[in-house]
Amino acid sequence: MSVTHTHAAAPPVPTLDVERIREDFPILAQEVNGHPLAYLDNAATSQKPTAVIDTLRHYYERDNANVHRGLHELSRRATDAYEAARATVAGWIGAPAPSELIFTRGTTEAINLVASSWGEANLAPGDEILLSELEHHSNLIPWQLVAKKTGAVLRYLSLDDDGRLILDDLPGILGGGRVRIVAIAHVSNSLGTINPVAEIARQAREAGALVAVDGAQGAAHHPVDVEKLGADFFAFSAHKMCGPTGIGALWVRGEILERMPPYQGGGEMIDLVGKHESTWAALPHKFEAGTPNIAGAIGMAAAVEYLRTIGPEAILRHEQDLVGYALDALGDSPGVRLFGPPEPSERAGVVSFRMAEAHPHDISTVLDREGIAIRAGHHCAQLVMQRFEVGATARASFYLYNTKEEVDRLVRGLDTVRSIFGGD
Amino acid sequence: MPGVPDVQLSSLYQQLILEHYKKPRNRGALEDKTVEVHMRNPACGDEIKLQMKVEDDIIRDLRFLGDGCSISQASVSMMTSMLKDRPLDDAIALARRFTEMMHGDPEAAKDRSLKDLRALQGVSKFPIRVKCALLGFDALQQAVLQSRTATGDQESAPSEGS
Ligand SMILES: Cc1ncc(COP(=O)(O)O)c(C=O)c1O
C-alpha cells in the first residue's frame, strides 16, 4: 500500500526575515552563562512575542472581569474578547464553527476530556482504541485510564527504523472491526515525524472509527485544517505556538460534541439547576465549567494573529530548512546517531540524537554552559525510547526565530562535549 | 582539563568522575544477591538496579546495572567500591554525608570519609543534576531498609523497590 502526498502546484512560500522576527521576542536578546541564548527547546515550549505579552498586559490593565456573568461594561468587554478569541483560535485550525471549540488547560486536558467524556459514554468491553508507539504520554495515559474503566483494549501502530508509523499494518487492525477511535499525534515531539493523519483518518472513517488528533506539535509547526485532516477531535496547546501556558483548546466535530456528556460540573456549564437534576448550557459552555483562563484564551488568540502575519507554511518551511541543515551537520559529526525520518520534508523542526561518548544529560549540561538550551530525556515518549532501545535522547527543536548560526553553535558545542568525554 | 575553558564545567566533570563513568566498578549482575532495588528518575529516564548480598547486617557484596548520565553512573560506581564488607549502618552514614555534600554543606565536602565521592562536589553547583548524583544513594537507602525488614526472614525472595 503506498501513501503519496501530492501537492498540486503549491503557491510559493515566502522565506522568513528571521532577524526581524527575533526582535519580536524580547527573551531571546539575553546572555546565558556568558553566551547569547540559543533557545532550541521549542518542542517543550515556545517563547512569546511582544504582541502576546502586550495583549495579556492590556487585558489585565483595562478589561479584566469575569465572563458570561456580569452585566457591567468590563464584563461585556472581557466576554467579547474571550468569545472573539474562540473564533480566532477555531479559525487557526479550520474549525467549521467556534461553538465546536472548547478552551482547556492545554492538550493534556483536552485529550483527557475526550477520553473521559466521549470514551466512557461510547466504549464497551472489547472495543479497541488504536494508538501509536510514538505518542506523547498525554495521548497515552488518558486512554489507558479509560480502557481500564470500560474494558476497552489498546492497540498500537508500530514505528519503522526511521521513526515512521508502519501504515501497512493499519488495514489489518481496522479490518478487525473493533476499533472505535484512532488517537494519533499530528507531529511527533520526540522524533519530529509528520504523520500521514489524513490517510489514517480516511481509512479509519471507512472502518467506522473516529479520529482524535494530538495537535500539540501540529498546530504549532504545521498548517492545520481539521476538515482536510479528516479529524473528529483536535487537541492543542497555546504555549507551543507563541501563546501563554495554561491554555489550549479542543475542537470536536459538532454532531459528536452534541452527544457528549459533560466533563466537569460547576458554574458556567449549567442552564437550570435543581436539587437533584440540572440541565446544561449550550455548546461549547457545557464543557467549560468554572471561570476559564480568560486572559490565556485572549493571549492564545494574539499568538494566532501573530503567527498568521508570518504564515504557517513559511514557518514550516523555515523549520525544515533548519532540520535539513542540522541533519547534514550532525550527520557529519563523529559518533552522532540521529533518530527520525532522514528527509526534512517528512518532519517538523525536531532533531533527536545521541552521541557515542556522552549521555544526553551531559550533552545538555555542556551546551547549557554555552548558552544553548536543548532538552535531554525521554521527552514524555517512553514508548519511542523503548522502540529504539535507548533511555534518552538529546533533542534540539526549532521555531520561527531560530537560525543556522544557532545550529552551527550546537554542532560546535558537541566538540566541547567530545573534548570532555572523548578518549580514554 | 584541556580545551575546556569553562571553570564550572571542569569542576563538574572531574577526571575521577569520567574515569568511573567509562570504567565503572562493580557493574553487572550479582548471582547471590539477597536484595535488589530498581530506582528510576522519572523526569529523565536514568535508572539504576542495585543488588546486594547482605549477611548479619554486613554488605558482603554489591553490584549495579544501570543506564544514565556520567554523574548518576559515576556516583553509583564510587559508592559500590566503598561499601564491600561494610555494615549497613556505614552505608546509611555514607548516604547521609554524601547527601549533605550534594546540598552544599561545606563541612561534608571536606570529609575525607567520602573518598572518591568528593570529586562529585561540583555537582552541587548544578541543582538540576543533584538528583542524578543521588539516584544510586536513594537505591542504597531503599536496599538497606529492605534488608532490615527482611531480617529473620532470610529465605524470602528479593523484593523489588520502586
Ligand atoms: C505531541 C505532544 N502531545 C501532547 C503534549 C502535551 O501538551 P501540554 O503539556 O501542553 O498539555 C505535548 C507537549 O508537551 C506534545 O509535544
Image (cartoon, coloured by chain):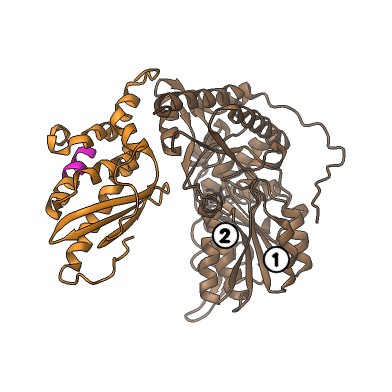
Chain colours: A brown, B orange
Residue A388: give x, y in percent of width and height. Answer: 55, 49
| Up/down of B53 relative to A9, above or below | below
Give the residue type that dot 1 points to: Leu
B101 left or right of A149? left
Q: Is residue B120 magenta?
A: no
Residue B139: give x, y in percent of width and height. Answer: 28, 53
Residue A24: give x, y in percent of width and height. Answer: 58, 27
Residue B94 found in image quarter: top left
Residue A262: which numbered mark, if any? none
Q: Can you identify the residue that label 2 sits on? A: A111
Q: Can you identify the residue that label 1 sits on? A: A210
The secondary structure type at the circle numbered 1 is strand
Is residue A402 visible from the viewing direction of this image? no
Viewer-nearest residue: B77 or A69: B77
Q: Mark 2 lies on which chain?
A: A
| Up/down of B149 relative to B134, above or below | below
- Pointer 1 and pointer 2 on the same chain: yes
Q: Mark 1 lies on which chain?
A: A
Q: Dot 2: within a 10 Å radius of its alpha carbon, few (fewer than 14), some, or many (20 or more) residues?
A: many
Measured Cα–Cα span from mark 1 to mark 2: 14 Å
User: Which region of the structure is painted magenta?
Assistant: B97-105
Viewer-nearest residue: A373 or A352: A352
Residue lying at the far front of the rendered structure: B31
